[in-house]
Amino acid sequence: MYSFKINSHVSFPLEGLDLRPFLAKESISKVTNYDLLSVICHHGTAGSGHYIAYCQNMINGQWYEFDDQYVTEVHETVVQNAEAYVLFYRKSSEEAVRERQKVVSLATLKEPGLLQFYISREWLNKFNTFTEPGPISNHTFLCSHGGIPPNKYHYIDDLVVILPQNVWEYLYNRFGGGPAVNHLYVCSVCQVEIEALAKRRKMEIDTFIKLNKAFQAEECPSVIFCISMQWFREWEAFVKGKDNGESGGDPGLGGGGGQ
């Protein structure tokens, strides 16, 4: 395959790249302005060469050049005149910045409240980095019954962030979603299901071992049945607990044929 490198200079803005004209008609995004975050430059031919990168520190707005182990502070004009190979933009929204500042100010008020709320750490990370984080989704740490799945409870602190009542109410009124969580508990329904599943797995594998030993002891079995090897592997993963464990991993429900 023949390849070549285009050496024509491409101009690009550091701020205010409006992509509204290129949005799909069904797009619901309200933010269409983007600011430059990083640039990758390639020096050399299409077959070989050297890469350097320019990245902006989002805290102080300063640009830096990354060239192997060397990091150098550069002026933004250096970035703007670079021969860009790849451009990285991020959505820009003053409203999103104001919302983050509002949350910080509410959190520092330390207003006395009778309740504290738990929110998904994953969603809160979206709020801190995305201009449009979408509705709050606490289902990253909740089961369908509203409790904590037993297999997640031992690391629940990694999945949630505690918020004071005023911060939760602000975020909930602004973004919706949920559900609201002010108490963490292990789901008893899921626990019963897990115990029943473990019991079933043990029963099935014990039965298989018993029947297989009896079959191996027969010198000339009169009847031999065939079974799909794909289904058997799925069943083996199920009884050994190597499936995903979320839905039970029942091979009889997963489409594996030849039971």
Image (cartoon, rainbow, N blue to C red):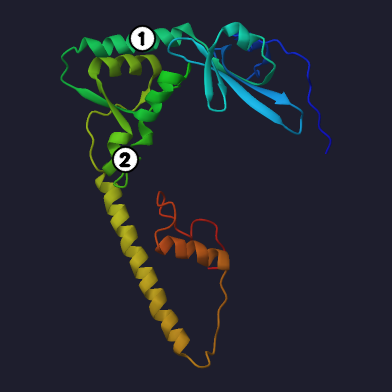
Picture coordinates of residue 82 (x, y %)? 67, 14
Q: Are marks 2 and 1 in contact (CB under 8 Å)?
A: no
Give the vertical position of 107 relative to 198 (above or below). above
Which of 139/49 is in front? 49
Q: Residue flagged by tag 1: what amino acid is it?
A: Gln
Which of 17/71 is in front? 71
Instruction: Determine the image quadrant of residue 147.
Output: top left
Give the vertical position of 107 relative to 2 (above or below). above
Which of 13/4 is in front? 4
**Residue wearing tag 1:** 101
- Label 1 neighbourhood size at 10 Å, few (<14), some (14-19), many (20+)? few
Q: Earlier in the sequence, mark 2 or mark 1?
A: 1
Residue at 44% x, 80% y: name it: 212
- Label 2 neighbourhood size at 10 Å, few (<14), some (14-19), many (20+)? few
Q: Residue flagged by tag 2: what amino acid is it?
A: His
Give the vertical position of 151 relative to 89 (above or below). below
Instruction: Determine the image quadrant of residue 156.
Output: top left
Instruction: Determine the image quadrant of residue 256.
Output: bottom right
Quadrant (top left, top right, bottom left, bottom right) of the N terminus: top right
- Judged left or right of residue 199, residue 67 is right
Residue at 23% x, 35% y: name it: 184
**Residue 117 can be seen in this image:** yes
**Residue 16 can be seen in this image:** no
Q: Residue furthest bottom?
A: 219
Q: Secondary structure at mark 1?
A: helix
Picture coordinates of residue 160 (x, y %)? 31, 31
* Distance from the alpha carbon under mark 2 to that under mark 1: 34 Å
Q: Secondary structure at mark 2?
A: loop
**Residue wearing tag 2:** 145
Residue at 40% x, 18% y: name it: 175
